[in-house]
Amino acid sequence: DTEVTQTPKHLVMGMTNKKSLKCEQHMGHRAMYWYKQKAKKPPELMFVYSYEKLSINESVPSRFSPECPNSSLLNLHLHALQPEDSALYLCASSQGERITDTQYFGPGTRLTVL
Amino acid sequence: AQSVAQPEDQVNVAEGNPLTVKCTYSVSGNPYLFWYVQYPNRGLQFLLKYITGDNLVKGSYGFEAEFNKSQTSFHLKKPSALVSDSALYFCAVRDNQLIWGAGTKLIIKP
């Protein structure tokens, strides 16, 4: 099974709200990722966790705060977002960070910031 | 630097005809190449990858891709297109992380 689940499917929030996106995988993968995707564009890498430790932060603004509570879960905490942050947020996982490891993606959370 | 190009923004194919979605790459070492598909309002689904070995890679949903080192290409193919194949297709090469092409919209007309 190559399933990555994400909740919620849709989220609408104001610029002063605090919300969280959740991602879960039960494939025993040890690397997990957050991507941001604008319409009809390729995904942009935000964060990488490897063995529950943050390994890559692609200069993401601090209003996005990732958290990896355990090897199966990945959260993205959102605070004081801007309308330009509206996008599809994708979570992915892979067995490891090896160059040959396949990343499997969840269905995404469609975020709208008002 | 590693890069991937998908030269066609959109490809139109009649149902039942063969389809090709083009991808070319530029890498400094061995290429590790991936194809993903994204259906409307959905996440990305892995189709296939080339790591090493046979130049013809078979993947999900009847898709295959041909790795051509001399032409630095990794074109995605399917012998007979289905209307349900209509989607956005991304080619990617793995460096430290995935480097993505711009995407090609595939439209299959009945």
Image: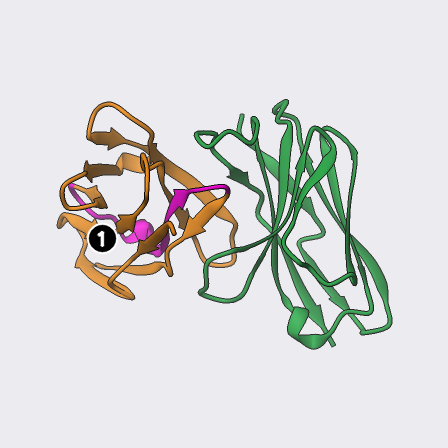
For residue A110, side relative to residue A65 (left or right): left
Chain letter of mark 1 equals: B
Pick whichever, A44 or A72, lies toward us. Answer: A44
In green, which chain? Answer: A
**Residue placed at 36% from the left, 59% from the top?**
B103
Q: Which residue is mark 1?
A: B22
For residue B32, side relative to residue A9 (left or right): left
Residue A47 versus residue A68 in the image, above or below: below
Residue A14 versus residue B31 in the image, above or below: below
**Part of the protein shown in magenta:** B79-96
The crowd level at tag 1 (other Cα within 10 Å; few <14, some 14-19, many 20+) is many
The answer to which image quadrant residue B46 occupies is top left
Specify the amino acid type for callout 1.
Lys
Residue B11 screen position, x and y as percent: 23, 62
Q: Is residue A102 magenta?
A: no
Count of numbered badges drawn on the protein:
1
In orange, which chain? Answer: B
